Image: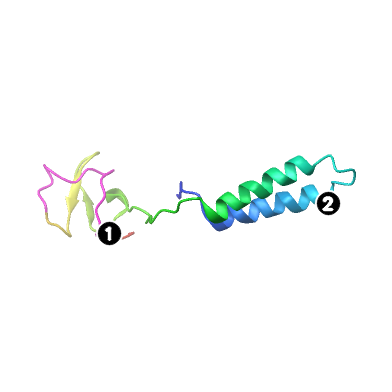
Amino acid sequence: MNDYIDREVLRTYMLAGISLAETFNKDGCLNDKINAYKECLSIVDEDMPSIDALEVIRCKDCKYFEETSEIKGECTYWKVMPTIYPFKEDYCARGEKE
């Protein structure tokens, strides 16, 4: 599940909106909407900050996780005591999808 905005997908949708509006803009009534889309598109292209994001693998979905209770487990990668760590919703940099 990705909750961040993919710049290229957003750009594709905005270009489709511009194209659709231009198709139905016979009498110029959609000029304001078209200009607004184009202005937003320029912001996406020039000013929209990007992030360096990776998908997180939760412990419950990791191949190194062995369930020991309803909320905790044991990490076979780190070999940490199950009474301390990890909870199913935790994650780490070494997580690998099961």
Of the pair 68 and 24, the residue shown nearer to us: 24
Of the pair 37 and 7, the residue shown nearer to us: 37
Of the pair 84 and 18, the residue shown nearer to us: 18
Residue under the point 68% across and 50% down: 38
> Mark 1 to mark 2: distance in Å?
51 Å
Residue under the point 30% across and 60% down: 96
- 84 drawn magenta: yes
Q: Position of residue 16 (x, y in %)?
A: 71, 53
The C terminus - image quarter: bottom left
| Quarter location, residue 85 | top left
Reading the image, the residue beneath label 1 is 63
Is 70 located above or below residue 21 in the figure?
above
Query: As shown in the figure, which amino acid type bears the numbered disc 2?
Result: Thr
**Left/right of residue 35 with respect to residue 24 in the rendered view:** left
Of the pair 52 and 68, the residue shown nearer to us: 52
Query: Which color scheme does this rendered protein use?
Result: rainbow
Is 91 located above or below residue 97 in the figure?
above
Q: Position of residue 36 (x, y in %)?
A: 68, 43
Residue under the point 78% across and 47% down: 21
Q: Which residues are magenta?
A: 80-95
- 40 drawn magenta: no
Query: As shown in the figure, which amino acid type bears the numbered disc 1?
Result: Lys
Find out whether the residues at labels 1 and 2 contact each other: C-beta distance under 8 Å: no
Residue 23: image tag: 2
Circle 2: element type: helix
Graded by Cα atoms within 10 Å as few (under 14), some (14 to 19) or many (20 or more), the crowding at tag 2 reads: few
Q: Which of marks 2 and 1 precedes in the sequence?
A: 2
**Left/right of residue 80 with respect to residue 54 in the rendered view:** left
